[in-house]
Structure formats: structure tokens, C-alpha cells
């Protein structure tokens, strides 16, 4: 790991995001809306950003270029999350998630063309295996609850594009500014969009304000924020064409934890996705 710092950071991101995925539904099932969960997540970004700045000696790039790059990374990520809420309201999750999960395709293409990144044949085999694994891991059985609107597809495509471009800009930004500064601006833009998330919340329904609501959400979302910080570091040291597909396979751990905790039996599609993902991570961790 010492000779591959990107791999260590990518592994932490995958681990934390996998655990986050296993528990993120608990506050929502208890009555704490996902939009308010976004608000809690944005707030958990603050201590992580402050810790990162402390590690960097409180040095924050504040030139116009750095502010624009860091804010772009944050707006694409947080804005995509808010748009995803609307996509899930208007369309079926079993179609939205597999489409959005393929955003590493955008990152890989941009990194190949614009950053001139290259990989070994083994890594390319892992990347090629990771893409179908992402779609399989995100698949959900069709549900007959509610009719889908035609709006879900363009919204899902926007999220797909936003997150793919976000990862590319994050890697590009690491070439001219500190990872700590990138994350600081990511946190700042996430917090700035809190009013949008609150406005999207349906307060006509009861909201759980107790321990199972914002407090549980904070504990779970902190894993998300730490994982995001480690992702910025992973992209500082590693290639985007490898780091992004690898960290996107966190649902493998989510499924395993769900099996152990909730006794959820994965179907054939998920099992196939898990096997493909394990193979992909092995090949990419060259």
C-alpha cells in the first residue's frame, strides 16, 4: 500500500461507501426524508473539510481558478444528487439507478481524451468488467407502484453526465491545487444547496426528528463524507480511469452487509454483478 497511496485511499472510499449504502435507508424508513438526509450529509462535510485543511496547514487556495474548479466539482456532485431525487420521484428506481451508475464511462472517456491517461491490459480488463458490474449491482426488480413519467430519463441522463464530469474535473483540479482545497469547496457548495433540498421536502408528511432521524443520518452520512475526502486523495495519486470505476463498486460490500444484517438474499442478477465486481477490483488493483 505504501507504494500505491491511491489504492489505500480508494480502498477506504470503497469500504466507507459500502457501509454507508447498507445503512442509509434506515433514517428514511424511520421517517426522515432523503432530502433532509442530503442536508445532514452537507453538514457532515464541514468537519471533514476542516480536518483536511488542518492537515494542509490551513492553506487554502483562493485564486479565481481554484475557486471555480473546486466549486464546479461540488456543484456537479451535490446538484446531481438533488436531481436524482427528482428522477426517482418521476421514474422507476430499477431503471434510474443502473443508468446513473454507469457514470464512470464519462470519466474514463474524458480522462483518455483530455488527460491522456493510459492503463495496462490487465487494468483495462478490470475497467471493462466493472462497467456491466455497476449496472447489475444497481438493478432493482420492477415495481408496479405508480406510473412513470417521461421526465425520469432526461433527469437520469443529467445525473449520469454530472457525476461523470465531476470525477474528471476532480482529477484535473488535483493537477493545479491541493486536494484539501478541492474538498473545502465541495463542502461549501453542498452547504449552499441545502435550501434547495429543504424546499424539495414534503413537510406534509410526518418527519422523524428523534435519534432515528437526523442523528442516525449524521452518523451514516459521515461515512459518505469521509469516503468522498479519500476519493479526492485517491484521484490525486491515481489515474481516474482506474480509481473511479473501482470506488464505484462499493455496492458489493453493501450487498454483503445487507445479507448479514437484514438477511436479504441477493438474486441472480446481483450475484452475477458481485462476482464481476470482485474480478474487476482484482484486475484494477495491479
Image (cartoon, rainbow, N blue to C red):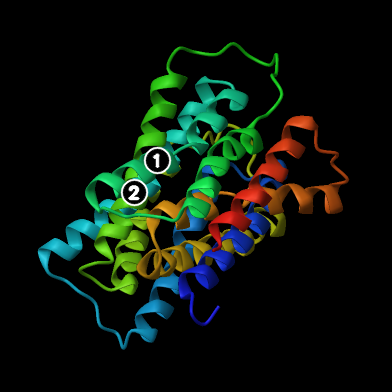
Residue at the image point whose x is 49% and y is 74% from the top: 4
Of the image marks 1 and 2, the number of the one nearer the N terminus: 1
Above or below: residue 188 compared with residue 209: below
The kind of secondary structure element at disc 1 is: helix
Residue sitting nearer the eye, 18 or 211: 18
When asked about the image quadrant of residue 177, the answer is bottom left
When asked about the image quadrant of residue 133, the answer is top right
Q: Which residue is mark 1?
A: 80
Tell me the quarter of the image containing the N terminus.
Answer: bottom right
The kind of secondary structure element at disc 2 is: helix
Q: Taking 111 as reference, is 251 left or right? A: right
Q: Which residue is mark 2?
A: 166
* Residue 66 percent across, percent down from the top left: 18, 65
* Residue 52 percent across, percent down from the top left: 40, 78
Q: Residue furthest bottom?
A: 57
Q: Taking 39 as reference, is 251 left or right? A: right
**Given this view, does label 1 or label 2 mark the residue nearer the observer?**
2
- Circles 1 and 2: CB atoms closer than 8 Å: yes
For the residues labelled 1 and 2, the Cα–Cα distance comes to: 9 Å
Tell me the quarter of the image containing the C terminus.
Answer: bottom right
Residue sitting nearer the eye, 54 or 264: 264
Q: Report crowding for label 1: few under 14, some 14 to 19, many 20 or more residues within 10 A (C-alpha).
A: many
When asked about the image quadrant of residue 110, the answer is top left
Residue sitting nearer the eye, 19 or 48: 19
Residue at the image point whose x is 19% and y is 62% from the top: 67
Residue at the image point whose x is 57% and y is 23% from the top: 95
Is residue 196 visible in the rendered image? The answer is: no
Q: Please tell me how many numbered marks the rendered image carries.
A: 2
Q: Residue furthest front?
A: 121
Residue sitting nearer the eye, 145 or 205: 145
Amino acid at each position: 500500500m505504501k507504494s500505491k497511496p491511491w489504492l489505500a485511499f480508494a480502498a477506504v472510499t470503497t469500504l466507507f461507501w459500502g457501509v454507508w449504502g447498507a445503512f442509509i435507508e434506515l433514517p428514511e424508513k424511520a421517517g426522515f426524508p432523503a432530502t433532509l438526509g442530503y442536508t445532514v450529509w452537507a453538514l457532515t462535510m464541514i468537519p471533514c473539510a476542516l480536518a483536511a485543511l488542518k492537515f494542509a496547514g490551513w492553506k487554502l487556495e483562493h485564486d479565481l481558478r481554484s475557486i471555480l474548479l473546486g466549486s464546479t466539482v461540488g456543484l456537479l456532485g451535490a446538484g446531481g444528487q438533488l436531481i436524482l431525487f427528482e428522477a426517482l420521484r418521476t421514474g422507476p428506481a430499477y431503471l434510474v439507478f443502473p443508468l446513473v451508475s454507469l457514470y464512470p464511462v464519462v470519466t474514463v472517456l474524458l480522462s483518455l481524451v483530455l488527460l491522456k491517461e493510459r492503463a495496462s491490459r490487465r487494468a483495462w480488463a478490470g475497467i471493462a468488467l466493472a462497467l456491466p458490474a455497476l449496472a447489475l449491482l444497481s438493478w432493482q426488480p420492477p415495481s408496479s407502484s405508480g406510473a412513470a413519467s417521461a421526465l425520469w430519463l432526461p433527469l437520469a441522463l443529467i445525473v449520469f453526465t454530472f457525476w461523470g464530469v465531476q470525477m474528471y474535473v476532480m482529477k484535473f483540479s488535483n493537477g493545479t491545487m491541493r486536494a484539501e482545497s478541492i474538498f473545502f469547496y465541495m463542502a461549501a457548495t453542498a452547504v449552499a444547496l441545502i435550501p434547495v433540498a429543504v424546499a424539495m421536502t414534503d413537510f406534509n408528511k410526518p418527519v422523524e426528528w428523534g435519534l432515528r432521524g437526523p442523528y442516525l443520518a449524521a452518523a451514516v452520512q459521515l461515512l459518505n463524507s469521509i469516503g468522498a475526502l479519500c476519493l479526492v486523495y485517491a484521484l490525486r495519486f491515481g489515474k481516474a480511469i482506474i480509481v473511479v470505476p473501482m470506488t464505484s463498486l462499493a455496492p458489493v460490500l453493501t450487498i454483503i452487509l445487507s445479507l448479514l444484517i437484514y438477511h436479504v438474499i441477493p438474486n441472480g442478477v446481483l450475484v452475477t454483478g458481485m462476482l464481476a465486481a470482485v474480478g474487476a477490483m482484482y484486475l484494477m488493483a495491479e
